Image (cartoon, rainbow, N blue to C red):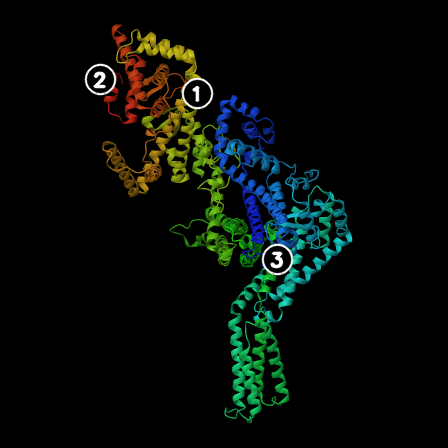
Amino acid sequence: MVDFLAENNLCGQAILRIVSRGNAIIAELLRLSEFIPAVFRLKDKSDQQKYGDIICDFSYFKGPEYYESKLEAKPELQDLDEEFRENNIEILTRFYLAFESVHKYVVDLKRYLDDLNEGVYIQQTLETVLLNEDGKQLLCEALYLYGVMLLVIDQKMEGEVRERMLVSYYRYSAARSSADSNLDDICKLLRSTGYSSHPGAKRPPNYPESYFQRVPISPTFISMVIGRLRSDDIYNQVISIYMGITVNLVEAWEPYKAAKTALNYTLDTANIKEQAGRYSASVESLRPQVQQLLKEGFLREEIVLDNIPKLLNCLRDCNVAIRWLMLHTAESAYDPNNKRLRQIKDQVINDSKYNPKILFQLLLDTAQFEFILKEMFKQMLAEKQLKWESYKKEGSERMMELAEVFSGVKPLTRVEKNENLQAWFREISKQIESLNYEDSTAAGRKTVQLIQALVEVQEFHQLESNLQVCQFLADTRKFLHQMIRTINIKEEVLITMQIVGDLSYAWQIIDSFTSIMQESIRANPFMVTKLRATFLKLASALDLPLLRINQVNSPDLLSVSQFYSGELVAYVRKVLQIIPESMFTSLAKIIKLQIHDIMEVPTRLDKDKLKDYAQLSARYEVAKLTHAISVFTEGILMMKTTLVGIIKVDPKQLLEDGIRKELVKRVAYALHKGLIFNPKAKPSELMPKLKEMQECNSFLRTKIQDWQSVYQSTHIPIPKYPSVDESATFIGRLCREILRITDPKTTCYIDQLNTWYDMRTHQEVTNNRLFSEIQDTLGTFGLNGLDRLLCFMIVKELQNFLTVLQKNILKDKAVVDIFKALLSAVNPVKGIVANASKVYVNAVTKTQKIWPPYLEAIMKVGQMQILRQQIANELNYSCKFDSKHLAAALDNLNKSLLSDIEAHYQDPSLPYPKEDNTLLYEITAYLEAAGIQNPLNKIYITTKRLPYFPIVNFLFLIAQLPKLQNNKSQGMTCRKAADPVDWAPLVLGLLTLLKQFHSRYTEQFLALIGQFIRSIMEQCTSQKIPDMPSDVVGALMFLEDYVRYTKLPRKVAEAHVPSFVFDEFRTVL
């Protein structure tokens, strides 16, 4: 019969592919379980309030129209729903495909069983497949893997969360409209079961059988599989079902009477006592045995070859004891709220005298013993034929030499010529030479006969008297014995060791030993070498999910291997992180000693004070701590490069990553704790806290998850701390504190001095030294990060402002009518407005109520622009000071690029960077970091055409002018602190807003200001008012500052206001 797993056996290959896919699906489910978006759990009140209306469970399907109409009724909900879709559709699709693959798996399994019954596979039926050893195994695995999938889904992804994710996927994807979509079937299979993995949660009725019945599988097939499994061994009441997922049968079999009764015999107090006592005694006897075997030089080749069964039995006993004790004492196997389980656990722990440290020591020793034995066997297998041939040659040559001795030709003392012995030894030499390595059984039998013959020849021919002949015979017998030993080195021994040493059941339980591992490393860093063997033993667990995938040559092999290897490497890193932690603890002590205890030795020192400055005990402590650090690093470097699964672990890289991780953790903690501010503190705590010592995501519509971020790493993660305010990180808190203390409603910014003053007390609040302090504390990256955050805040503020403008101001018919009336009054803009004061005052008075929120938004943007300018100045100054060549190179490159782009627009035949060229994008990051940028020239948002936009902004500006006054030394300042307007943020805010729109809006806006100045001046001249009105002074100041900030030529302003007005204005100043 054709081998069931042969490539040309279609029946075998079909079920092998199904089983291979099953293992890959479980790996994907386990991988995804770590990436469930927290928002779908709806645990926080804030999440429930924000997303409650857009995240639904399966109740959605009862009335989708009702839910959708609720969304359509509220534009803000629609906007939130769209943002939520953009952020989550990618991960939802990944989850859906995993869920779909589970459904497809069971459908394919059912189809395979139907094909068997219908005779699709010639000469194969369900019965014949179950009669075949491989077929029987694969069918059992296929059903078992389906059960594991469903249990993994229920344990790792709560029912409600699954439903919400499926509903969200249904709403956001094209699956709802696709005819061939099997979304309905997937929803039926994976709807909530009511099961909860939380301790103390009640088990739903008929669980899990009702869950397994959702897609019915042939009862005949199931009964046949159960028949196959009846005789299989079960490891008492706690079992591992797949990669460390443990199940306590006492709990799992509770609803099934017959199973429960059968298990109760096992759970009899006396039986538990006997089992626990047996394993306790086993551990006590095995520990000294294994330690004896591990002594240096004990496991030599001849001892191993002579004691293979004995060594394998010792290995088997160690692994069985470790498995039983690990599984039956694991916290995860017992529900703390179940009284009976607690009693069983306590009895097991007491009767087995369970000590986790002793069990861990046995695991370490067993892993080391297993590793040494495996390596020896691998080497012996590799050299097996070579050694066997070498022993054969030596034995044959010895016999030929003896034959020559008895020929009487070879001079050997007192040996007479004996032709019979000469011929006999020659024959033996030929017999040894004829032994065939390929036919190991026959060669083994013949070798035994040859050894016996050599013993007999020594006895019957009285050859004992000649020591040299005896030595030759003894050597030959030794070589023949070595040949027998060598021929018995079989791969089956390695396979047995692999099966016996399986540690897949501890894939999750092993984490409970992490603290013991770390304590032992802290006490003795060289323990890492022993742990290496334990990690390799744990890596053998990968064989379980990869076996079938490998057999069928599935492309899933790499991704599944990477997942499990990555999990294991992450665990190795977690355990070994104790080394960098201990190093940094010692470093902190050294720093404390050097700063607080050890005095600095002066350049001149009196002889009698030498002893005081020596401080020998403190210096000895520093030396001791420094030595301890070097011992820790030596310990991890002794681990050697190790292949964990398919990932190569380099100890140097591990140490470097560990140190970086600890450094990141400590720096992040220092910044988190150091930059928390009290908003009520007077004066601000900002400067003192800076002397003592990535927030942009909240402003992005499409959020960047941790697993998508280029800055976040699984090996060296940036820690996340609970928020202490609305900020997510210290940069956010720092930014909001700066915005609070420079708030335009409470402070006045004097541009000439780069300083903020309190409006009421006129005391200095802060100045541009603030940014030098931030540069010193957080460095260029910190300052650049602060700048980026301000950039996102400006974008958010402008977007919110335009939403308010469009929905509130431009939708108010009464306000729009005022704009229309004013437009008709000022047309043509080149002319003079008749009765100007009345027209303007009337329009301002009627629109008074709409300006407060408008002013707040404009000044916020202006305030942030001032801060960005200050940051750019500081970055540029430090760049020129610290890296003058970089600053000069960037400046020249920037100018030449701009020059080329301008030339291209003059003549399109000249070169221009293509769309796929990242030069402009990349150079921008460098320019921003070096402060070679003007924040005022930035386009922050994309905009559409807005009606009345120039007139709205003009009216807003002239509405603010009466609140301001011109001060000869300070420029434009606020008249009353109770009605605050800060000039610089007002100008820069308006300038930034106009910059976001087409330049014709700015032209019209400036023309309206020019007309305002001309009309009021005309009225003053006709009424013979000698002084220039303050509003005109303010409007002229705006034009002056506008030209100065935008670096435009003066003719831009003079196009709207005659130059003589500017001349008169300067005399006023």
Mark 3 or 2: the one toward you = 3
Question: Which residue was labeled with disc 2?
Answer: 1059
Query: Quick one: SS at disc 1?
Result: helix
Q: What residue appears at the point 45 percent right and 37 percent down from the top-left corner?
A: 694
- What is the quadrant of the C terminus in the image? top left
Amino acid type of disc 2? Ser
Query: Quick one: SS at disc 3?
Result: helix
Residue most toward the left? 1060
The x and y percentages for residue 162 are 58, 36
Dot placed on the residue nearer the N-terminal end, 3 or 2: 3
Image quarter of residue 1053 = top left
- What is the quadrant of the N terminus in the image? bottom right
Residue 66 placement, left or right of 744: right
Count neighbours of disc 3 (C-alpha within 10 A) and say few if under 14, some if 14 to 19, many if 20 or more: many
Residue 387 placement, left or right of 1063: right
Between 226 and 351, the residue placed more toward the observer is 226
Question: Which residue was labeled with disc 1?
Answer: 804
Question: Which residue was labeled with disc 3?
Answer: 363
Image quarter of residue 803 = top left
Rendered position, 998 above or below 298 = above
Dot placed on the residue nearer the N-terminal end, 1 or 2: 1
Mark 1 or 3: the one toward you = 1
Rendered position, 29 above or below 904 = below
Count neighbours of disc 2 (C-alpha within 10 A) and say few if under 14, some if 14 to 19, many if 20 or more: some
